[in-house]
Image (tube, coloured by chain):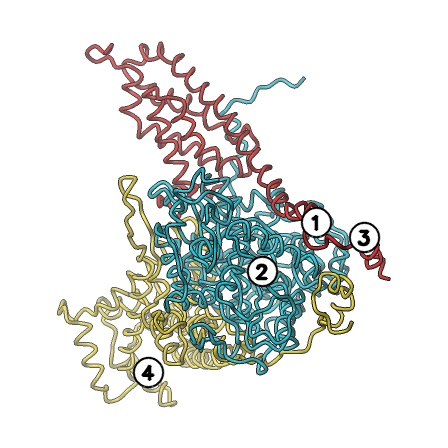
Amino acid sequence: MSSLQGIRSLNELLSEKKQAILEKWFDSVLKTYPHDSAKFLKRQKDQFANPVGSTIYRGMGSLLDLIVNSADTDNIIKSLDEIIRIRAIQDFTPSHALAFVVELKRVVREEIKGETCASQLIDELPEFDRRVDGLLLLSFDIYMKCREKIYELKANELRNMTLKLVERANRIFEAKYRNVDLEDIISQGNKTERGE
Amino acid sequence: MAKFTAKPVDLLKINFKTPKTDWMDTPVNIREHMYCHPAKAKDLETVGFPNIHEWRPADDNWNLPEDWKEIVINGIKERLQKYRSFHVFMDICVRCGACADKCHFYLGTGDPKNMPVLRAELLRSVYRKYFTAGGKIFGKTAGARELTEDVLKELWYYFYQCTECRRCSVFCPYGIDTAEITMMARELTNLLGLQLGWIGGPVAACYMKGNHLGLEPHTIKSNIEMMLDDIETITGIRINPTFNRKGAEILFVTPSGDLFAMPGIYTCMGYLMLFHELGLDYTWSTYASEGGNFGFFTSNEMAKRLNYKIYAEAKRLGVKWILGGECGHMWRVLHQYMDTWNGPADFLEVPKSPITGTVFDNAKSTKMTHISEFTADLIKHGKLKLDKSRNDHLKVTFHDSCNTSRGMGLLEEPRYIIKNVCNHFYEMPENTIREKTFCCGSGTGLNASENMELRMRGGLPRANAVKYVRDQYGVNMLANICAIDRATLSASMDYWVPGVGVAGVSELVANALVMKGEKERTTDLRGEPLPGKEGAE
Amino acid sequence: MKILFPFFAVILLVLLAVVGVKGANLHFLFGVVVPYAAVFTFIIGVIYRVLKWAKSPVPFSIATTCGQQKTLPWIKQDKLENPSSTLHVIGRMALEVLLFRSLFRNLKGELKDSSRLIYGSDKWLWLAGIAFHYSFLIVLLRHIRLFAEPTPSYLHLLETFDGFLQIGIPRLFMTGVILLAAVTFLFLRRLYIPQVRYISLAADYFPLFLIIGIATTGILMRYFFKTDVVGVKELTMGLVSLSPVIPEGVGAIFYVHLLLVSTLFAYFPFSKLMHMGGVFLSPTRNLTANSREYRRINPWNYPVKVHTYEEYEEEFRDKMKMAEIPVEKE
């Protein structure tokens, strides 16, 4: 709309340079992995042979689209979730796990540096930065959810294992051993435990 | 207060670990959430494991016995002489890399030492140093290295990040099987008392009480009785199974996880309902109440000691043959080891289905048949009345367990069953199923909770394929024939692919099974309303 | 280091042969002693290694099953991937040894247009492996010409086939070129693919450099330096008839070639090249998978301490009785 001849808005530029930005951004994430893992994550594009690399790459791609098109939060969360869910269980501190979001600012600035209309674009940068900051805040939520999930899983497994114990405690006597004296059973059990 | 000065770029760079160094020069970094706690001394004493001592993986000093190095070297020597597999696999790898990206742990962690070839090289380098001329003379140039405490820690760390799933061995041009190497490495760590709690505990429980969970006889019975109550609620039929009954035709053995853990108990209810409907003359045993074998993850000898109970109990009870439930490594052991260890089972008869008359010739020596073989045969002969629509609320995909696919070849039977009890069945992508199936990421005793991050990473390749069919076809149920899968894939799905449940194939069978004299069912085994019966209660 | 060390080792070998023959006139050493020693080491070494492997038993039936098992009669068994008879195993091994079946499996799924799943294959390694091994085999067979008088007729057939392109004089043998190309590919692959480079040892580069050297000197001799074939044959026939002679006029490059080949032979039994023998002994491939049908005997099977039913009942008798589970002793 606002673009006169030769002057493009930041959004237009981002769409145009999406691939270059994505590659750079992806590379910056790869750098957080050990050298040899990084090369593997980058080379192998197959979704099933390289779930980590391909998921992060895909997630970042759609995230870029969504930022440019000012998409709704739900979709953004979905894409962010794909990436963060993986990074939340890798060897990263929370700050390292999420640093990739802020990294987008640097990548975009680098990409627009050489543009003729850079000065106009710079005016639009604060708005872009605000969006990235929004992403970062959302990322905190998602990261926390993932970590909470991990602990929930641990708790759940324990619960799944002991659920039957509790149930039995409730039902054991009333069902089968209704006529047996509770005291007897307990004293029997104690004797056995003591090895008598 | 410290001033926060780090820029994002710096944050990214701090973690820029570039092992430009050779793998031998990259020391092991034992990370929390990636390993399991050590075993309790009391459990190891129960079965008489050697060199029991206090130690913690994160500590610098593991309190190893004085002669630990000698123990390991002699241990390697003994195993080279006992196992041709180990000996040949130590020598012939050409490091072509075909296995590298086939391991779920490598795919999920990106750690180069999780490539099967490198995992094996960790031990091979020690082998070369002490057992080959080249290694002795040329040392590092020949790929050999001294056995130090750090090397031992590295062996321990990475051989407890292998689930012996054998996927690498499918792709290796020489059939090198990392599972064989991992088994040997784990035997070596076991010699030094470096056992995991999650393995040591179940082993001791199984040895003394007959099953991994340590369920005592009366508990087993009352657990099953609770399931019978639930079955009665759902179907209106009261089932009366027998325990330790002499003279039964068949002994039924299943992993104890089915007796206790969710969602394994639904699978167990499935067995109970099926056998009742058939009027099968069978018995449970509280003594041989474990099909699985965590001893298999410690040493060959321990595995044999635990496995002993199955034939011993079959003989004591005087049954004709043995039927086995759904479990992965249990069937690796039953199919490839049991007969050799504790056979010959000449007191048993070749398994013969009393319903169809089919003789299971493929089990004519071991005399033990898989429930999927048994059920598939029933369905083929039209002996079961099935109402597939009762599973219409499920869109099912099937996960092949590592051991039943690559250590047995049980591929079509469960698929045939599923297709006959479910209307909606979708396969995951071809290179992630059958002999190329991905591990759940938690096998071989790694299904603890303290190593949840390791499990989630290892489970990612499998989950990723499930995600594909969930997004593509709306799949909401991951069927399988393994107790460890049922327990651990639930967590993996919950994290990676929420909305997908996990079920044993026998649970799906029982859902569809129309039983004589049953009341009109309104729910499935889990108490979820059946399609079209929502709000019926 | 991993690359440079073996590289310079091969260079050293080349120089050694040149200096030894040209400078020190050690024709007999390089033309007779070294080849005899190498072949001797090869034969003894390989036999020793194979016997050593064979001495370790195969206690368990641990075939890796890569297909449907033998089961109910109406389910089709995958006989080659899950063999239940010796015949099936022979088939499986033949596929493995002759066609590199497992490498061929190297499938790779790819997602096109983010929705269609396409199965491409990652068969370059397989192709290079096949090309390398078969061209090496044919090149070796062609060399029989140097050790047999008169030249067996099947060699003419082989040579006609190998040189069917009819380029140049002497005619270009394809296998020599393919061998060099394949071995170069295997080398570059080791360098280029990060994981493979990471796992590679000096012991992986050394045979590659040796073979590159052997193929290069061979090609140079045949097409460029036109080595005196009659002289060479005189030498080789002398070797094979155990009455060694050193003919005049055979160039130094032949001695380089011969030393590299001798090194390869002598190195063979001590190295990963033994995979040639090992593949036949690999228990995950050469066993039948019908382990429930026929019992495998473990030669070192020994009695173990077990927890008997009697001990179990002793511990739990009261609880069993209470739960109405039958017991042996009331």
Circle 3 Cα neighbour tier, 10 Å, few/some/many (<14 / 14–19 / ≥20): few
Element under label 1? helix
Does residue B430 appear to the left or right of B333 in the view shown? left
Q: Which chain is red?
A: A
Task: Determine the image quadrant of residue C325.
Answer: bottom right
Q: Chain of mark 3?
A: A
Circle 4 Cα neighbour tier, 10 Å, few/some/many (<14 / 14–19 / ≥20): many
Q: Please tell me which residue is depicted at 55% across the width and 22% down the height of the picture.
A: B6
Q: Chain B: give its colour.
A: cyan
- Mark nearer the viewer, 1 or 4: 1
- Mark 1 vs 4: CB contact within 8 A: no
Which residue position holds label 3? A186
Q: Please tell me which residue is depicted at 32% across the width and 10% down the height of the picture.
A: A119
Which amino acid type is shown beneath numbered disc 4? Leu
- Asked if both marks, 1 and 2, belong to the same chain, the answer given is no
Q: Chain of mark 1?
A: A
Q: Chain of mark 2?
A: B
Which amino acid type is shown beneath numbered disc 3? Ile
Which amino acid type is shown beneath numbered disc 1? Glu
- Mark nearer the viewer, 3 or 1: 1
Which residue position holds label 2? B255
Viewer-side residue, B144 vs B191: B191
Q: Position of residue A180 (x, y in %)?
A: 77, 55
Which amino acid type is shown beneath numbered disc 2? Pro
Alpha carbons under labels 4 and 2: distance apart: 70 Å
Q: Chain C: give its colour.
A: yellow
Circle 2 Cα neighbour tier, 10 Å, few/some/many (<14 / 14–19 / ≥20): many
Q: Position of residue B377 (x, y in %)?
A: 41, 68
Instruction: Using the image, tell me which numbered label, if any, was put on residue C235.
Output: 4
